[in-house]
Amino acid sequence: MKILVALSRVFVGVLFIISGMIKLNDPLGFSYKLQEYFSADVLNVEFFIPYALMISVLVVIFEVVLGVFLLIGYKPKFTIWSLLAMIVFFTFLTFYSAYFDKVKDCGCFGDALKLTPWESFTKDLILLFFILILVIGLKYIKPVFGKLQTTILALLSFIFSLWFGYHVLMHLPAKDFRAYKIGANIQEGMSIPEDAAKPVQEFYWKFNVNGEEKTITTDGSYPTVKGDFISVDSKMITEGYQPPIYDFSIESNDEDLTTQFLNEDNLVVVISYNLDKIETQGALKLKALQDEALRQGYKIIGLTASGEEAKQRIKEAYKLDFEFYLCDEKALKTIVRANPGILEMDKGTIKQKVHYNDLNLLELPKVERKPE
């Protein structure tokens, strides 16, 4: 039993630290996932949505420090029971998502590793099993170091987690796992290979045949049957191939400009998923960025999901001359974890990406500007 507890201790502790650090690297992204859980279509607790970021930071910090506490043996009773409470809650959440098909990705490992709802639930069941072993063998969990050293390590883990979470919120994730990372080409990310797996669906057709209800299953084709049609339902068997980028577009009020701008050289793009929520500190820097970009020969545009009224209000308030085009809000939140965030692109390839707090790091060497 002692050996089993030791192995469980290492497995659970390391997994909680890895999972927590991946999410702590991008707490804003995890907060978006929590908002999805809190929405009316899932848990219907929308009053939590304004606090999603705060909850996100607290949960992932707690996840990391509990992993550290377990490994070093700091306050074993508190640590084990906290781990049990957390995994029971997450197991319920992943089961609910999987069974009712509510959330396609739990966000357990951020964007680093995508798990299906049932994979997430299975992972939580395995963790629950090992944590129950720790509950049973609680007496075997002893501190690895002396009391003072253990307390210092526990405190340092909390301070580091708090600092790291604050740092990435004020800048950008230290490691970008998304399809829009620096060096990625958006057009390539949107492309679908010719040999890509196709989605597979089953269709369930209901007919009234001689006074009896009969169900016929097909792959989508209308069945040949003598009877009166009642209804049809469908079920996705396999999703098929989905490109890393599938919801990106650049549109004006009357045309799709995606291809045009993804073939543009020396393009600076200001990203603001919601202009009504744009950070004032960042918006105040956009006029200087605009002037510098134009002076150095770059074209500058904005992307937002906001309407015309918000666009005009922001342009007038901050004396901006560049145009804001429409793009899907979820895509914009994925591209950069800042509002506003700034990209520099060449023919759809992301060369630079910065938080508005790091605009001084954006390098715009002079280039020859092409005529409009």
Image (cartoon, rainbow, N blue to C red):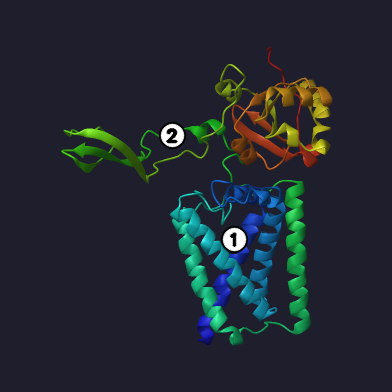
Q: Judge whether residue 174 can be spotted in this image.
A: no
Looking at the rendered image, the disc whose residue lies closer to the viewer, 1 or 2, is: 1
* Residue 189: numbered disc: none
The image quadrant of residue 144 is bottom right
**Helix, strand or loop at disc 2?**
loop
Q: Amino acid at mark 2?
A: Ile
Q: Position of residue 249 (x, y in %)?
A: 57, 28
Q: Give the Cα distance between marks 1 and 2.
A: 30 Å
Q: Position of residue 302 (x, y in %)?
A: 70, 27
- Left or right, 246 with respect to 229, comes to right
- Left or right, 200 with respect to 269, comes to left
Q: Is residue 177 above or below residue 135?
A: above
Residue that carries the numbered disc 2 in the rendered image: 192
Q: What's the residue at 48%, 61% (across, down)? A: 121
* Residue 19: numbered disc: 1
- Contact flag, marks 1 and 2 (Cβ < 8 Å): no
Q: Residue furthest front?
A: 211
Q: Amino acid at mark 1?
A: Ser
Is 274 in front, or is 247? 274
Q: What's the residue at 52%, 62% (across, down)? A: 92
Q: Position of residue 342 (x, y in %)?
A: 72, 34
Q: Residues within 10 Å of mark 2 (few under 14, many from 20)?
A: some
